[in-house]
Amino acid sequence: MNPWATGLVLPALLHEIKTAGKWQIKAGSLVVLNQLVTSAPLQMARLMHDIVPVLSEAIWDTKADVKKAARDSLTKATALVSNKDIERFIPALIKALINPVEEVPNTIALLSATTFVSEVDSATLSLMVPLLSRGLSEKLTATKRKVAVIVDNMSKLVDSPVIVRPFLPKLLPGLLKVEQTIGDPEARSVVGRAIATLRQVGEVPEGDASDLPPLKQADNGQLAHSLISIYKKAGANPVPSVADVSTMYASHLAANLVNVKNFDVPEWDTLAPYLSFLASSPEPITIAREWVVRSATEGTDDNDVPDDEEEGEDLCNCQFSLAYGAKILLNTATLRLKRGHRYGLCGKNGTGKSTLMRAITNGQVEGFPSPDEVRTFYVEHDIDGTEEETSVLQFILSDKRILAGETEVIETLASVGFSDERQKQAIGALSGGWKMKLALARAMLFKADILLLDEPTNHLDVVNVAWLENYLTSLTHCTSIIVSHDSGFLNNTITDVLHLNRFKVRRYKGNLESFVKQVPEAKSYYTLEAAEDYKFKLPDPPLLEGVKTKEKSLLKMRKVGFQYPTQPVQQLYDITLQVSLSSRVAVLGPNGSGKSTLVKLLIGDMEANKGGEIWKHPNLVIGYVAQHAFHHIDNHLDKTPLEYMLWRYQTGEDLEEMTKANRQISEEELQKMKDGALVVVEGQKRLIDEIIARKKLKQSYEYEVSFKGLSSSENIWLPRDDLIKRGFEKKVIEVDTREAQRLGLLRPLVRREIEKHFADFGLEPEFVSHNTMRGLSGGQKVKIVLGAATWRRPHVMCLDEPTNYLDRESLAALIEALKVFEGGVLVITHNRDFSESLCKEVWAMRDGRLEASGHNWVEGQGSGARIDKGAGEEEDTYDAMGNKIDVKKTKKLTSAEQRKLKKDRMARKKRGEEVTDDEL
């Protein structure tokens, strides 16, 4: 029997196994079924969705012989499952079919911990769906959630709606029911995501898939007429009939081949024996080959395979799959690269752009040429911290991959702007922009066949971006793959787009503009527009004592200078500035002009050492995201975002604040504190031990101090200015910071509140509570950093190059959030779209000097609108477990009511009744 006729025979066999009155017929049908598994494995695997339900019933047959034969057949049929991800679970899956009550929860738990990366076919789904369908009926919410995670992950790996359609009626209704009845909001969102993925893959716009129209399949009659027309064209006499049994049989086999898009000539040659019954001339083999050509032309969708056949040398042509942690990124994707082309790697955050680049660099992409065949170089600006003290020149000379001599290295560094003096500088003293130029110089010296550039314009000013564009477009022998959120740079540079979407890589000819015309939904890669359903939200800052308008200054610098200890020249000169709640500041300037240094002084990461004064409101909270944003979380990548937040704010304070320079006490400051610790109280000499607490004192504060060797009853209160004069300024700042965080930290540090906070930045609870940060994309990590920085409800947001790792859609959402933010905003950026759409004030930095424009600096409160005190005071109150406490407001009594109460109290006292002190 021809293997492609299996679909004709199988329904009759399954019918007998299910309904035959005699057990011998059932057993015999099972034997034939086993033979088909051996003789036509490919065809039987595609029909597993019909086989498994019948065998699952037969294993409970009352006749022992049938039961044994059915279990044997089930074991042999499941061997057709070729998915490597679940191969080791097949025995457990069979057990779950045989004993569902006990085994289903355990098997689902095993599968939920599995990373699925292999393509999911009909055979795989046939074995999995009965288990998953049963799992949706389990009582435990955790089990239902795990089922939803498995469905979501596996659905993403289904290549065609034809494969998943037979299983939709078994899964979709159950998922919809769970979504409506499950109590846990986070689990409900996971179920909703699984439903959305299943609908997308199965092309089900709405409903539960119970009334779907059939998918387009090859038509037997159409193929029969096509065959007869070939005979007519060949001059056959007589011309065969469409109604001939051999015509109908051959057409059925051909339809099965077309449905699986199998147009291999040897497979179609197997139809020739049946065609020989129709006519002896022309040769049946000739007719079969003409038939396959015509069927292939009519049966192939033009969009199935992009045309990638063009002139030029192939550097790479491979098919591979890629996963990162527990997340599937690419599945049987094809990557084809031509020499001299410049490819823009495009896709949403989390689709695997940077991971693919890393995988190529680390040799983890199956089929990618080895370094001996193709020299590949990954350009990165995050240089290892162990190299901070190494000079620029020595850093490149020590790279064993670079074979160039010292003279060539010096000339190349000079060509990208490194003077002799700068080549001798330590890497740690370079700005982000100069570090990127150093990475590019190293790539030039490597003489690569393929350059991998991950966000190459990060930290580069306009002049250097233009230089990079010219350099890349001048490379005719080298291929580039570029990941960048700078749409202008991509548009001017690339020749092709590699689009990462739905676990595939598809190439589009032309630049970014051309790509957007072909794929309109990718417009977010090109325009800075926020989607209606995609928004960020920053928490409103709490009120500050003494601040009645948004114009009142919260932070000031006066004549501040700074110089790095290892540098021969000063970095900042005479810096004077002011920040308020209304500030919207863009800090602009060329690479190395001192922008990041200025911001680090503002937030307290460094201290001014060349004179000047820095003042900030004692209760001011600043939210800071560094230029290299990931440094905030680099030491915590094996934690989930939830665990990171619980660690960082475990004491009620921000543990990151403890490491700042303005919290570290130097030897000189320690000596000053020792000299100023002596206090004379009523003729008694005392030594200050600690500063305990703070309270308001007119326009300033006074602080409770304890003394060495004395009990707390001997504590006294000293004014702020007095303590600062005595050298206790950093101890005062420590108490101020603690009080500021206490005032701002009104939300409970519990899972629900943390998930809700991160949801305001577009991060789903699944990633917050169930995924370690190591497995998240760069864009998702930046959202974590933003969320962590705003947990304390800061009064001022300070963002150093925030555009580096966010896609255009997220950038637009961040801009809209900052526009309506009730606090001040400071932004360092080279992205003109970002700065012009947000900032009205500019701090222009050049050669360490600041020129401010567009500001509204005032002395005192200013003339702006008064802050509504009621707006920030009505906060929800929670207990230690995160439960909301309903606080009843006390009504203020009128004068008449107070007089009446007083009269009643006096009367009760006169009658001898008990009256408390509170009532008097």
Image: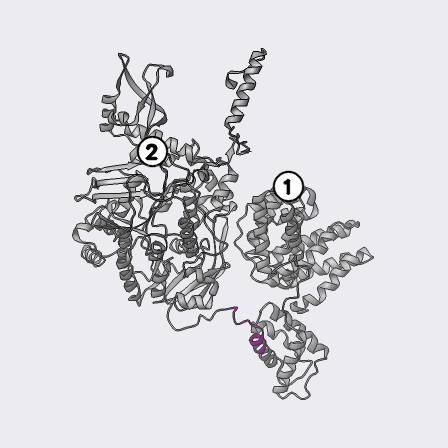
292 part of magenta stretch: no
Of the residues shown, which amino acid type is indicated by label 2? Pro
- Rendered location of residue 533, percent (x, y): 50, 54
User: Spatial distance from mark 2 to mark 1, Cα to Cα?
Assistant: 50 Å
* Boundaries of the magenta span: 294-304
Q: Is residue 83 left or right of residue 501?
A: right
Residue 618: image tag: 2
Q: For the point 59% across and 56% down, which residue is it?
A: 198
Is residue 311 shown above or below 590?
A: below
Is residue 425 shown above or below 230?
A: above
Which of the two residues, 338 or 318, is positioned nearer the viewer here?
338
Secondary structure, mark 2, is loop
Is residue 533 shown above or below 675?
A: below
Query: Which tag is nearer the camera, tag 2 or tag 1?
Result: 2
Q: Residues within 10 Å of mark 2 (few under 14, many from 20)?
A: many
Can you say which quadrant of the picture contains the N terminus? bottom right
296 part of magenta stretch: yes
Secondary structure, mark 1, is loop
Residue 140: image tag: 1
Of the residues shown, which amino acid type is indicated by label 1? Leu
Q: Residues within 10 Å of mark 1 (few under 14, many from 20)?
A: few
Which of the two residues, 462 or 408, is positioned nearer the viewer here?
462
Query: Would you say residue 150 is visible in this rendering?
Result: yes
Quarter holding residue 492: bottom left
- Rendered location of residue 58, percent (x, y): 74, 53
